[in-house]
């Protein structure tokens, strides 16, 4: 491989290695320092691929304001189980997506686009729930512009509603409340609005700023109004992108298809993805062989906010992986290989990622006020609230503790997902993590700490915070 890259003969490289006291064979792996020595001996220039090189290849220059054009908002639907997320997504898709001429079955590709009455195109991510949302964010992809929070009008704010609110807040994404099941006999929209107040979500009808729309996924009531509310919110966000550049985007879902090989649904975030483009995506690379849109039609290109299914990958990426178009296959391969190696190294060193001490050390590097994000799970609501309040008092001018989410019950995988995405440790008060959460935490290097005395918990966080201050140079 080394001989190949230098365009030298293998025998000469082996000979040179031997002259340097390394009895290597043709297929043996040599370390980077040795390789560097040999390369110099042959009079070639060494280029070591590093994080910053990788960054440079895929770095995109800032877009000029004049190149920017409006793009469709990208929407994720979140809310408590059974409040109607899936039904709402289906209802929106059914009423708005024009069936293809062939009348074929519309293929599910993980996202779809619809048009509001005012002509605004909206892109919906078709995987409801915050597990998808946080796992994407954990991988570095901030894909969502607007969260639609679904709350059933015959129910109220439930634990996962609160989680969804906290997820949206942590990602700094604006929310629109869809009060669903308004057709139900027991529907009480005002009760929902009032219960949202307790979580500092003040909807317009309560003189707040969060738009709220009463809808029914079953009979279609309020759907046009919901789309209009989204459109209005997106105007406020002034979402722009430059279609005239090499594409970048995020993987929404990917799988290995028996007939077609690895397939990924990519949401283009900037630029235009074209057939024949060479790209890296996470630890994989590829060349766009074919693309299909959300209607299952073949397309040759996809601009900003457009979801497409991409064929031509060399491996299966993961949801949340970022895709970047690069110039040459050699670059694409090199970056993918570099990332694969880096990921292997990281896995080897896993377990030490998100400890409280490390977080403090990281926070310290930040020039502004260091913010320590944490998650709290407790056995009863009273404890969760008491801990949250105590935590939020710990801050001073330099360090601030921020409770991303506090809730009642065992520590779950969702908690770990949010913790990972925000680089936060999880504090369990008289509760444990369930088995799958423990496994995920181990894998992702998220720290879980258990307590049964509030004072101990507060003390530990305080100690870490003051330790940070006394370490200051
Ligand atoms: P998800 O878990 O949030 O995705 O909820 P689903 O979409 O699966 O809906 C849960 C249940 O509520 C299903 O039985 C739906 O038929 C029902 N449902 C959803 N939306 C409505 C609605 O607007 N009105 C009524 N009456 N039922 C609804």
Image (cartoon, grey):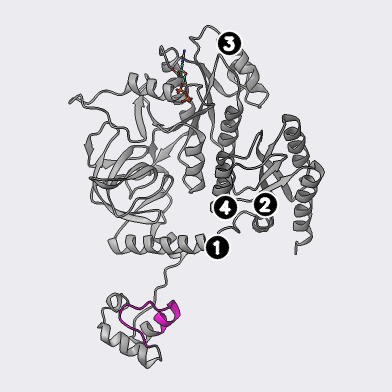
For label 3, the residue is: 188
Q: Position of residue 102 (x, y in %)?
A: 17, 26
Queried whether the magenta region covers residue 259, the answer comes back as no
Could you tell me which residue is drawn at 48 percent across and 48 percent down? 139
Q: Are marks 4 and 2 in contact (CB under 8 Å)?
A: no
Name the element at disc 3: loop
Name the element at disc 4: helix
Q: Determine the residue located farthest toward the right in the rendered image.
A: 455
Kindly report which numbered mark, 1 or 2, lies closer to the viewer in this rendering.
Answer: 1
First of labels 3, 4 by sequence position: 3
Name the element at disc 1: loop
In the rendered view, tell whether residue 242 sits above or below residue 230.
Answer: below
Please provide the residue range marked out in magenta.
23-37
Image quarter where the N terminus lies is bottom left
Q: CA distance from mark 3 to mark 2?
A: 45 Å
Q: Position of residue 60 (x, y in %)?
A: 41, 53
Q: CA distance from mark 4 to mark 2?
A: 30 Å
For label 4, the residue is: 442
Name the element at disc 2: loop
Kindly report which numbered mark, 4 or 1, lies closer to the viewer in this rendering.
Answer: 4
Kindly report which numbered mark, 3 or 2, lies closer to the viewer in this rendering.
Answer: 3
For label 2, the residue is: 368
Could you tell me which residue is drawn at 72 percent across and 30 percent down? 381
For label 1, the residue is: 349
Q: CA distance from mark 4 to mark 1?
A: 12 Å
Kindly report which numbered mark, 3 or 4, lies closer to the viewer in this rendering.
Answer: 4
């Amino acid at each position: 491989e080394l001989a190949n890259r230098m365009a030298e003969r293998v025998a000469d490289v082996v000979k040179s290695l031997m002259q340097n006291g390394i009895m290597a064979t043709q297929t043996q792996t040599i370390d980077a320092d040795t390789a560097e020595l040999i390369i110099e001996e042959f009079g070639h220039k060494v280029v070591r691929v590093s994080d910053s090189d990788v960054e440079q290849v895929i770095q995109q220059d800032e877009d000029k304001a004049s190149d920017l054009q409006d793009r469709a908002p990208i929407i994720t639907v979140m809310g408590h189980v059974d409040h109607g997320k899936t039904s709402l997504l289906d209802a929106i898709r059914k009423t708005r997506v024009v069936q293809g001429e062939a009348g074929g079955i519309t293929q599910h590709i993980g996202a779809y686009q619809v048009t509001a009455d005012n002509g605004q195109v909206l892109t919906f991510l078709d995987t409801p729930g915050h597990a998808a949302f946080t796992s994407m964010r954990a991988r570095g992809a901030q894909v969502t512009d607007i969260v639609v929070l679904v709350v059933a009008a015959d129910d109220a704010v439930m634990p996962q509603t609160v989680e969804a609110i906290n997820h949206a807040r942590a990602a700094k994404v604006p929310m629109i409340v869809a009060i669903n099941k308004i057709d139900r006999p027991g529907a009480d929209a005002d009760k929902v609005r009032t219960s949202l107040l307790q979580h500092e979500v003040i909807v317009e009808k309560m003189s707040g700023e969060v738009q709220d729309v009463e809808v029914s996924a079953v009979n279609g009531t309020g759907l046009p109004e919901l789309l209009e509310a989204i459109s209005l919110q997106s105007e406020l966000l002034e979402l722009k992108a430059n279609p005239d550049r090499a594409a970048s985007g995020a993987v929404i879902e990917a799988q290995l298809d028996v007939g077609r090989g690895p397939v990924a649904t990519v949401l283009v975030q900037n630029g235009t993805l074209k057939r024949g483009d060479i790209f890296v995506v996470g630890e994989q690379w590829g060349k766009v062989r074919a693309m299909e849109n959300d209607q299952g039609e073949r397309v040759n290109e996809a601009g900003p906010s457009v979801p497409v299914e991409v064929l031509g990958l060399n491996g299966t990426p993961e949801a949340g992986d970022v895709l970047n178009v690069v110039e040459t296959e050699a670059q694409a391969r090199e970056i993918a290989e570099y990332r694969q190696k880096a990921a292997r190294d990281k896995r080897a060193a896993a377990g030490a990622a998100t400890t409280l001490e490390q977080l403090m050390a990281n926070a310290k590097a930040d020039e502004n006020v260091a913010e320590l994000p944490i998650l709290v799970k407790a056995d009863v609501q009273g404890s969760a609230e008491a801990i949250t309040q105590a935590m939020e008092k710990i801050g001073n001018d330099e360090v601030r503790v921020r409770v991303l989410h506090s809730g009642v019950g065992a520590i779950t995988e969702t908690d770990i997902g949010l913790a990972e995405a925000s680089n936060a440790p999880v504090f369990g008060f008289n509760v444990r993590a369930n088995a799958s959460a423990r496994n995920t935490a181990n894998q992702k290097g998220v720290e879980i700490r258990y307590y049964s005395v509030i004072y101990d918990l507060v003390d530990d966080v305080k100690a870490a915070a003051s330790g940070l201050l006394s370490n200051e140079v």
